[in-house]
Amino acid sequence: MLRMKIVGLVLLVAGLAANAWACSLCASMNYSRATLREDLATARLVIFGALANARVGADGKGATDLQVETVLKSDPILAERKVLTLPRFVPVDPKSPPKFLVFCDVINGEIDAYRGSPVKSGAVVEYLQAAAALPADRVKQLLFYFRYLDHPDAEIAQDAFLEFAKTQDADIARVASKLDPARLKKLIIDPATPPERLGLFAYLLGASGGPAEALFLSELLNDTSERLRPAFGGIVAGLIQLDPKSGWARTHAILSDKNRPFSERLAALGALRFFHGANPTAARDEILRGLAGVLTQGDLADLAVEDLRRWQWWDLTKDVLALFGKPTHSAPIVKRAILRYALSCPLPEARELVARVRGSDPELVQDVEESLRFEKPAGGK
């Protein structure tokens, strides 16, 4: 049982660490998925072509031919082949053969196609070749990907957004004012835009727009439809860019309102994380005020406590420690978060809480201490 707890905590810590390197306004994204650019860099072979001749052999094994049209990354094993046989059955309409971008490795002298992405046309070739040639400057890269966020090929549009989602908050903030607000507004209004993208688009609109965009975002914030709830963090972050006083007031109101849906408050918490990631000192007081409101809520307190601990912001130590043992904060995940905070905090009152809990529940303290060791880098102190 103890081992399972520790493994779970390792996964939690790993997830927190991964999110620290990604956009805080895209919380529902799968950051572990590689972008096309990342796959291009690691693959031995990358081929674009059309599928044909799908069949099942006498042995019951499927196969489909990939008719090679463009080789984006080659390897001597490919030679001059114009057809690559994929060892799986993929349904093919001969009248409209599907186009695929296929990433391959070479294992034991054989081509191993490990990822295939369906695409609408050869536009993905131009897109990926241009992406591979981009300079190291992340802002210039994001300006390029911004042009593809509304691309008619869903795979390209998804990949362009994933590049934004896997970008640090500071770089998102740096590029935001350089973007076209009209294009962003169109993306937000479009019902085909996936909901998980709306929060980022709303922030970018606020950072690049003006008074008209402030009114638009205010109207979005009053929209209680389920589709917009996950975007609340980005909407209030955009409002803060356009009208800091009003934007922060609305953010704090959302965070402190226990009757608000959990998804709305969680999204607004993402706005605090974003501004911390973009510039930790610029909005410190406002971020702390928002977190103070969250601490009183048992269903979100562990997230706020963990943020404060990771950032090593000890301003609210008394508020955090006072939560330990409260009936509203008795869930194990909350108690462990408070104890992790106390074990990390250098203040004497934190050490006093640890000593008290060690006397009443030494196994809990030992378990949490063990989880904290996983956060330290190899050879670290």
Image: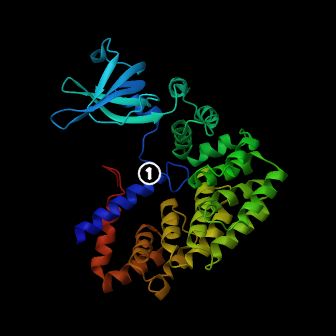
**Which of the pair 153/143 is nearer the observer?**
153
Residue 378: x, y in percent? 31, 49
Q: Name which residue lies at 20% across and 36% down.
A: 61
Residue 115: x, y in percent? 36, 36
The residue positioned farthest toward the top in the image shown = 80
**Which of the pair 9/101 is nearer the observer?**
101
Tally of marks: 1
Q: What residue is pinned by disc 1?
A: 18
Q: Quadrant of the C terminus?
A: bottom left
**Residue 279 visible in the shown view:** no
Amino acid type shown at disc 1: Ala
Q: Quadrant of residue 361?
A: bottom left
Residue 156: x, y in percent? 54, 36
Left or right of 323 on screen, residue 59 = left
User: Dot 1: within a 10 Å radius of its alpha carbon, few (fewer than 14), some, or many (20 or more) residues?
Assistant: few
**Which of the pair 28/288 is nearer the observer?**
28
Q: Name which residue lies at 29% across and 15% down.
A: 76
Left or right of 124 on screen, residue 243 = right
Question: In the figure, 323 relative to 248: above or below?
Answer: below
Question: In the figure, 36 relative to 249: above or below?
Answer: above
Q: Name which residue lies at 35% across and 15% down.
A: 82
Q: Quadrant of the N terminus?
A: bottom left
